[in-house]
Image: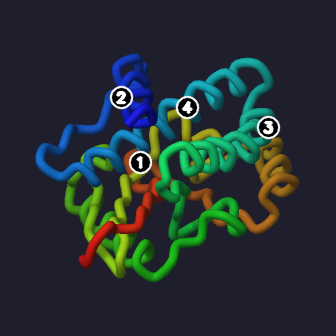
């Protein structure tokens, strides 16, 4: 409960638009809060890194900060928290399993049909766990390192930090991936 209270406090201080609330499903409410906490911890670090050292430095910060944030939230909450993508940047940590892949494919379809990525999510009981994905949409800041045309210096930094990168070529508003959360259910699903 202390963790959830801290996450909710973070949400109230967020500089970014929070995810819509879901009434009546405690697991989904908790998953959404954790997804928002991940966003709230990572975005300011990336913005600061861009301002202080440019895109190359932001890539370096993302390479260490994103996994650290996911690991910290996982340890604090009892959930498994990670980022996944059909076109992963960090293939050692962001490749989706079959359930995530299926949901991410539906996310792409929903976005193509006009749904805003911030509104795209999915949660369900699956194989003894509550699983939840919150889409991560491409925002203007993302295009510097994930866009269709990235600067040569950005490409060089990507090759150092993410030699197997597949996460470029995106356009504004596309679903780039998702924050994935999973937690064992107490009873049968």
Q: Which residue matches tag 3?
A: 56
Q: Which residue matches tag 1?
A: 137
Q: Nearer the viewer, mark 2 or mark 1?
A: 2
| First-in-chain label (2 vs 1) | 2
Residue at image location 38% in from the left, 47% down from the top: 173
Helix, strand or loop at label 3? It is: helix
Q: Tell me, yes or no, whether the two marked residues, 1 and 3, touch with CB atoms within 8 Å.
A: no
Structural crowding at the residue carrying mark 1, measured as other residues with C-alpha within 10 Å and reported as few (<14), some (14–19) or many (≥20): many
Residue 145 vertical position relative to residue 5 in the rendered view, above or below = below
Q: Quadrant of residue 59?
A: top right
Q: Residues under labels 2 and 1: Cα distance?
A: 22 Å
Q: Nearer the viewer, mark 3 or mark 4?
A: 4
Q: Quadrant of residue 8?
A: top left
Visual colour scheme: rainbow
Question: Residue 63 location in percent, x, y?
Answer: 74, 47
**Frontmost residue, 91 versus 12:** 12
Residue 88 vertical position relative to residue 29 in the rendered view, above or below = below
In screen coordinates, is 146 left or right of 110? right
Say the numbered circle drawn on residue 8.
2
Q: Tell me, yes or no, whether the two marked residues, 3 and 4, touch with CB atoms within 8 Å.
A: no
| First-in-chain label (3 vs 4) | 4
């Amino acid at each position: 409960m202390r963790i959830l209270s801290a996450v909710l406090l973070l949400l109230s201080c967020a500089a970014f638009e929070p995810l819509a609330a879901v009434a009546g499903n405690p697991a989904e409410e908790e998953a959404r809060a954790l997804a928002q906490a991940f966003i709230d911890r990572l975005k300011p670090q990336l913005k600061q890194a861009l301002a202080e050292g440019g895109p190359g430095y932001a890539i370096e910060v993302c390479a260490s900060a994103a996994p650290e944030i996911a690991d910290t939230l996982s340890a604090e909450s009892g959930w498994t928290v990670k980022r996944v993508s059909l076109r992963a940047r960090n293939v050692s940590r962001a490749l989706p399993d079959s359930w995530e892949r299926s949901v991410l494919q539906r996310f792409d379809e929903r976005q193509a049909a006009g749904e805003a990525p911030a509104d795209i999510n999915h949660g369900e009981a699956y194989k003894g766990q509550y699983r939840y994905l919150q889409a991560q949409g491409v925002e203007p800041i993302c295009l510097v390192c994930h866009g269709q045309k990235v600067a040569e210096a950005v490409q060089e930094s990507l090759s150092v930090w993410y030699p197997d990168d597949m996460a470029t070529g995106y356009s504004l508003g596309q679903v780039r991936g998702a924050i994935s959360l999973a937690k064992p259910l107490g009873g049968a699903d």
